[in-house]
Image (cartoon, coloured by chain):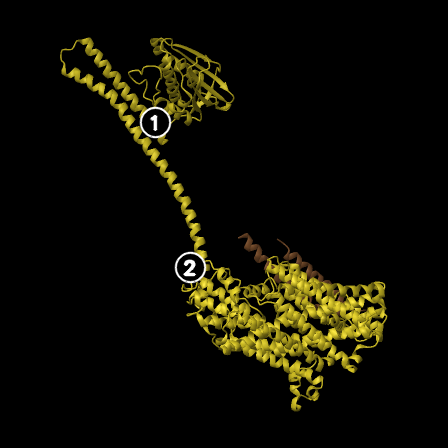
Chain colours: A brown, B yellow
């Protein structure tokens, strides 16, 4: 019982992480980050790499849990 | 120096190394020590996604369109997040049905339809050819740049026919290489372990090469990222470059590209090949779901710095697609450009190898084989001939696919940049996504719906992306793009129905997906699937259902001989032997015996692994009479087994409970039997005890009645006996009543505080006469002057007299001695009565408290009459227990016989009686 429970929690968490990733990579947030740096070199790429790294880190943490 | 010879030797040397790795991988696979049984290798093989398009084109796209190049990698990151759910399902299905390609997969989902498989194969061929052209172009251009620098590569490409020939040679060399690589043998499972190992190595090489350039540019050409970005900040036209404004289509284009990359990652034939077909263990998906995105992040880390550095360098860097090469060249380096060339070659060859193998499998299994089976089936005579046919078809297909790619490159490719070609292919491959993904989760999707959706999506894609490409390269009238066909403006390919301001890919994706999904869902809702289609639909949508693992899916009948003949004819002796030797019913192996469902399933899988599922089904149907399981059976397997499991679980729970209850009942029953037995014994004993005095009373009474002239003294004696026995009888009845009251809990006691020492003396006085008569010396030792306890005076006296009486009976016959002592023990008073008799052995000590228990005195002749009723001690113990005390037997300390001790708790001080009479007794 405990095992199946843990497994289903894992997929639930994975789906939640997917939703977070989609939000991080999508326009509402992208536009905000882009506007944030109107005068200098855009922060957008830096933000994207950072968000990407966070998503990868969270996935790794989630998937490598036993 | 960068001579042609050096470059060629390096390139061929690298290809040879790859070949050795592949051959090694294949050999290890044959030995059963797979090289690719690791999630890391699996993740690296997925990195075949990063082609020459990534290697050279990302920088070009970053230079032109800002951060939009990242979307090509963020989409797959999202897809890999879903890998443990979605891709796992695909892997499970592919493994069970021996799927060989995405065309095979879609065909199998919709009832193993031959026509649908052929359609998908054809669409894949058309949409992927430009992508292969792109790789050829990348290799040729990078080679040209390497040799001609600092002259620009583009001009030489157009001017000299020699370089044009070069890309033809590249295509042919690759064709030979892929034939050696991918069609060395025809396996039952269409897996290429050696190829995967080589691809994984290539992924490492291209990553190292790209990062080397990045590090060189950032840390050698500039002094770290800070220096680079301050130069960028000082150049006004570059400042805006990485903002959202540079992305074609703005926010809409952003979302469109993200979706496009997401879908294409799952549906590109080469991605399907490495993700699903070449997967050796679905557990690998877990690691790959983050390792592959990490790979993509690393390989893109230096794209923006390289793009900026190239743009800052200006004209000297040439075309932005070649920045990766021209930047180290401009710095006058020799080794690094060669490494970059090898990296680019890795990226390009990796893609071409996997893509071509995937496409050639589709062409042979989905296009040629069905035709061949229709016309050629009867003519295959020698065993295993088909394997040769298949290999031949695939080899020809490989050469043709690469020539097609070369033609596209030679005729059209020059008018496009790398990224543009790639995205056209992406949008084409994405057309498979609705049929694939919806079919994976919606059982109602039908073959007709899928076919209509695919055709419509493909037509819209062709019209909005492929044909405009022809127009741009001058094959078609360019007015098509500005005024629409026949001047109809709302049919302009890039602005369909007047939709303006979108980038061309999002625009195409919107209309093609609308047509594709709309028709798939719409037609599915209004058509009926065939029974077999329903079966396959259930098998696909329920693929992760645990009950499907072990179910044999055939119900038809055939003999083993027929099946064996079929397999030998198409797959050869070796494979046939393998299929039959796995059989678990070896003992029944005989050509005339019926083949088991399991054997039929395995045979179909073996055929499917080589020929594709549609052809395999046609072949199996030619020998098997009957059908595969229909939808009702599948559904009932899925439903009933889960219900059965539930019932089983409940049943088990119930039977556990029953077991526990029956244990309890058995225990209770045993107790009842024991009680019953004790009751019977008790009744027997009581009867016996009552009969003895009754008998003697009756006997003496009869003597008195019958003999009239008895002397007086004799008459007196007899009457005395009768009286004595009557007393004994009434005492016995009194005791039995006491016992009955004790056991039923109806014994009424009047507990009052009283002085136990006074009571003891009183009892001693009561028996003194009797003791004197018997010559017993009684010793009394009372150390506690006043021993106040709570008790019932009469009952306690009865107990003490009983103890003294017992002691006198069992004391030594010649010099009987009895000793009574009363003393305080902690919070209790103890009264013990000792005798100097033989004592009571340890195992008898508890039994003396049993009803009617008479001690057998060993070594002495049993006395004529029992010394007591055997009820005194049980009653005494019952009374003492009721008063909160204990009564037990131990060894006599002073006299050496038995010692019976009663213990009663001392009464609390305030309970001192105010009635002195009670104390005095």
Give the foreground label among 2 and 1: 2
Quadrant containing the N terminus of chain B in the rendered view: bottom right
Q: Secondary structure at mark 1?
A: helix
Residue topped by disc 2: B588
Q: Secondary structure at mark 2?
A: helix
For this rendering, which residue is in front, B811 or B205? Answer: B205
Residue at figure coordinates x 22%, y 20% from the top left: B695
Residue topped by disc 1: B739
Q: Is residue B704 left or right of residue A10?
A: left
Is residue B453 in view from this perspective? Answer: yes
Q: Is residue B320 left or right of residue B606?
A: right
Residue at figure coordinates x 31%, y 24% from the top left: B734
Q: Give percent across and percent down for residue B613.
A: 52, 70
* Cα–Cα span, label 2 and label 1: 79 Å
Quadrant containing the C terminus of chain B in the rendered view: top left
Residue at figure coordinates x 55%, y 79% from the top left: B452
Q: Residues within 10 Å of mark 1 (few under 14, many from 20)?
A: many
Counting every numbered tag in the picture gives: 2
Tell me: residue B262, above or below residue B717: below
Q: Give percent across and percent down for residue A20.
A: 66, 63
Q: Give percent across and percent down for residue B347.
A: 71, 68
Quarter of the image where one finds residue B844? top left
Badge number at residue B556: none
Q: Residues within 10 Å of mark 2 (few under 14, many from 20)?
A: few
Q: Give percent across and percent down for residue B134.
A: 70, 75
**Which chain is disc 1 placed on?**
B
Q: Residue furthest bottom?
A: B486
Is residue B538 in view from this perspective? Answer: no
**Which chain is disc 2 placed on?**
B
Q: Is residue B431 left or right of residue B254?
A: left
């Amino acid at each position: 019982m405990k095992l199946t429970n843990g497994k289903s929690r894992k997929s639930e968490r994975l789906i939640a992480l997917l939703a977070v990733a989609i939000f991080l990579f999508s326009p509402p947030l992208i536009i905000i980050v882009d506007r944030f740096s109107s005068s200098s070199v855009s922060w957008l790429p830096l933000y994207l790499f950072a968000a990407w790294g966070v998503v990868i880190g969270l996935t790794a943490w989630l998937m490598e849990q036993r | 120096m960068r001579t042609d010879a050096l470059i060629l030797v390096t390139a061929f040397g690298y290809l040879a190394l790859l070949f050795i790795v592949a051959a090694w991988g294949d050999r290890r696979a044959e030995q059963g020590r797979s090289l690719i049984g690791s999630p890391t290798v699996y993740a690296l093989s997925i990195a075949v996604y990063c082609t020459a398009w990534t290697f050279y084109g990302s920088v070009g796209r970053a230079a032109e369109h800002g951060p939009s190049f990242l979307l090509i990698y963020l989409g797959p990151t999202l897809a890999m997040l879903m890998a443990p759910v979605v891709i796992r399902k695909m892997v499970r299905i592919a493994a069970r049905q021996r799927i060989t390609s995405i065309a095979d997969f879609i065909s199998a989902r919709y009832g193993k339809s031959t026509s649908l498989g052929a359609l998908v194969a054809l669409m894949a061929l058309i949409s992927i050819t430009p992508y292969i052209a792109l790789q050829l172009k990348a290799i040729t251009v990078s080679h040209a740049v390497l040799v001609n620098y600092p002259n620009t590569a583009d001009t030489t490409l157009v001017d000299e026919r020699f370089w044009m020939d070069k890309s033809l040679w590249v295509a042919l060399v690759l064709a030979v290489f892929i034939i050696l690589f991918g069609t060395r043998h025809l396996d039952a499972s269409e897996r290429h372990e050696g190829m995967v190992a080589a691809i994984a190595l290539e992924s490492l090489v291209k990553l190292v090469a790209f990062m080397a350039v990045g590090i060189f540019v950032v840390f050698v050409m500039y002094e770290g990222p800070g220096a680079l970005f301050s130069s960028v900040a000082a150049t006004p036209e570059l400042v805006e470059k990485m903002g959202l404004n540079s992305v074609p289509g703005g926010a809409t284009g952003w979302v469109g590209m993200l979706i496009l990359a997401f879908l294409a990652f799952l549906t590109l034939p080469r991605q399907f090949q490495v993700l699903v077909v070449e997967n050796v263990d679905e557990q690998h998906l877990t690691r790959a779901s983050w390792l592959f995105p990490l790979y993509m992040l690393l390989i893109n880390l230096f794209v923006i710095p390289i793009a900026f550095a190239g743009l800052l360098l200006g004209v000297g860097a040439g075309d932005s697609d070649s920045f990766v090469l021209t930047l180290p060249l401009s710095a006058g380096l020799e080794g690094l450009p060669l490494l970059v060339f090898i990296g680019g070659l890795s990226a390009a060859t990796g893609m071409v190898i996997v893509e071509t193998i995937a496409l050639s499998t589709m062409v042979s299994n989905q296009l040629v084989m069905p035709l061949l089976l229709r016309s050629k089936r009867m003519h295959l005579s020698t065993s295993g001939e088909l394997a040769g046919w298949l290999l031949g078809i695939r080899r020809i297909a490989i050469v043709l696919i690469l020539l097609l790619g070369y033609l596209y490159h030679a005729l059209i490719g020059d008018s496009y940049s790398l990224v543009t070609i790639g995205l056209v292919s992406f949008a084409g491959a994405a057309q498979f996504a609705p049929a694939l993904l919806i079919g994976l989760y919606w059982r109602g999707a039908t073959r007709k719906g899928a076919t209509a959706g695919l055709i419509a999506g493909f037509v819209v894609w062709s019209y909005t992306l492929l044909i405009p490409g022809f127009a741009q390269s001058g094959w078609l009238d360019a007015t098509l793009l500005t005024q629409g066909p026949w001047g109809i403006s709302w049919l302009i390919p890039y602005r369909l129905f007047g939709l303006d301001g979108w980038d061309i890919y999002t625009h195409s994706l919107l209309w093609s997906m609308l047509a594709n999904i709309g028709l798939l869902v719409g037609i599915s809702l209004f058509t009926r699937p065939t029974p077999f289609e329903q079966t396959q639909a259930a098998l696909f949508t329920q693929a992760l259902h645990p009950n499907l693992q072990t179910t044999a899916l055939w119900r038809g009948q055939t003999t083993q001989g027929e099946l064996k003949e079929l397999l030998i004819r198409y797959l050869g002796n070796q494979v046939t032997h393998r299929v039959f030797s796995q059989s678990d019913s070896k003992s029944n192996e005989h050509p005339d015996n019926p083949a088991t469902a399991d054997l039929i399933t395995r045979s179909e899988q073996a055929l499917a692994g080589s020929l594709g599922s549609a052809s395999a089904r046609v072949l199996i149907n030619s020998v098997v009479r009957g059908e595969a399981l229909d939808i009702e059976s599948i559904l009932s397997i899925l439903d009933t087994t889960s219900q059965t499991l539930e019932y089983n679980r409940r049943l088990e729970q119930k039977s556990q409970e029953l077991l526990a209850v029956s244990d309890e009942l058995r225990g209770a029953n045993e107790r009842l039997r024991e009680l019953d037995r004790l009751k019977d014994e008790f009744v027997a004993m009581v009867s016996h005890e009552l009969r003895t005095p009754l008998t003697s009373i009756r006997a003496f009474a009869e003597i008195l009645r019958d003999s009239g002239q008895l002397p007086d003294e004799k008459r007196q004696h007899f009457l005395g006996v009768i009286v004595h026995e009557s007393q004994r009888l009434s005492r016995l009845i009194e005791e039995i009543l006491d016992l009955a009251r004790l056991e039923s809990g109806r014994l009424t006691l009047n507990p009052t505080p009283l002085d136990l020492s006074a009571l003891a003396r009183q009892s001693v006085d009561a028996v003194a006469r009797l003791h004197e008569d018997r010559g017993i010396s009684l010793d009394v030792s009372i150390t506690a002057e006043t021993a106040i306890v709570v008790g019932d005076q009469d009952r306690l006296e009865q107990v003490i007299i009983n103890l003294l009486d017992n002691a006198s009976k069992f004391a030594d016959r010649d010099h009987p001695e009895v000793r009574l002592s009363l003393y305080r023990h902690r919070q209790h008073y103890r009264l013990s009565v000792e005798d100097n008799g033989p004592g009571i052995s340890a195992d008898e000590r508890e039994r003396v408290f049993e009803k009617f228990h008479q001690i057998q005195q060993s070594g002495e002749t049993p006395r004529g009459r029992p010394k007591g009723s055997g009820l005194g001690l049980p009653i005494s113990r019952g009374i003492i227990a009721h008063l909160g005390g204990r009564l037990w037997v131990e060894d006599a300390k002073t006299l050496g016989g038995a010692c019976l001790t009663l213990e009663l708790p001392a009464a609390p001080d305030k309970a001192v009686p105010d009635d002195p009479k009670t104390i005095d007794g």
